[in-house]
Image (spheres, rainbow, N blue to C red):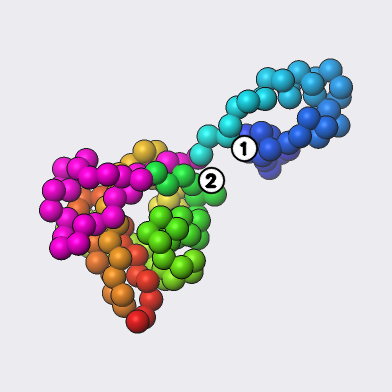
Amino acid sequence: MAGGSSADLLKLSRRDLIQICGAPDGIRLCNALMGRCPRPRLTLYVLREPAGGAEGTEDGCSGLYQEVHLEELTVAELTGKLAELLGLPAGQIQQVSRQGPSGIHILVSDTMIRNLLDETCFVVAVAKGNTVATGRQSWAGDDGPG
């Protein structure tokens, strides 16, 4: 358990806990954990940029956002969840960038994701062959050539 997380602990079965802790402590631990769902490590709220630009989203709170829950905090996981959310085939998003100071686009890395604040709002824009983003907190996905 030295390299495990609390989410790993919640995935263990009653039998696993009894084998690890012994019968009395394993049963107590199982009863304490029962019914508790693992909480995602990071929750983000994503709004797809409306067609024709990001009018009405400048305050970062307009529109209908959707939740994205991340457990692994990796670019691969984020890319997969964004593709699913946007209805794109898995693997079609080639890169994800974040709009930084003065409108520059910064390639999203695992480290950047690990340092995001929980429950941050983003506006996402998808472009073919290049990266486009709008708004203060935004991501852009490059869905490859074509």
**Callout 1, which amino acid?**
Ala
Name the outermost residue toward the left.
Answer: 55
Which numbered dot is residue 71?
2
Residue 145 versus residue 137: which sits nearer the camera? Answer: 145
Residue 81 versus residue 109: which sits nearer the camera? Answer: 81
Check disc 1 and report its element: helix, strand or loop.
helix
**Callout 2, which amino acid?**
Glu
Name the outermost residue toward the front.
Answer: 87
Q: Is residue 103 visible?
A: no
Q: What predominant SS class does the magenta segment belong to? A: loop
Relative to 65, residue 25 above or below: above
Q: Is residue 54 magenta?
A: yes
The Cα atoms of the two marked residues, 1 and 2, are separated by 9 Å
The tag earlier along the polypeptide, 1 or 2, is: 1
Residue 73 locus on image (x, y percent): 50, 50
Residue 35 locus on image (x, y percent): 63, 25
Q: Where is the N terminus found, in terms of image quarters?
A: top right
Residue 65 occupies quadrant: top left
Residue 53 occupies quadrant: bottom left
Residue at 40% x, 61% y is 87
138 displayed left or right of 113: left
Q: What is the span of residues highlighted in magenta in the rendered image?
A: 41-66
Which numbered dot is residue 95?
none
Residue 20 locus on image (x, y percent): 83, 31
Residue 51 occupies quadrant: bottom left
Residue at 13% x, 53% y is 55
Relative to 54, residue 115 above or below: above
Q: Is residue 32 visible?
A: yes
Residue under circle 1?
Answer: 7
Check disc 2 and report its element: helix, strand or loop.
loop
Residue 137 versus residue 48: which sits nearer the camera? Answer: 48
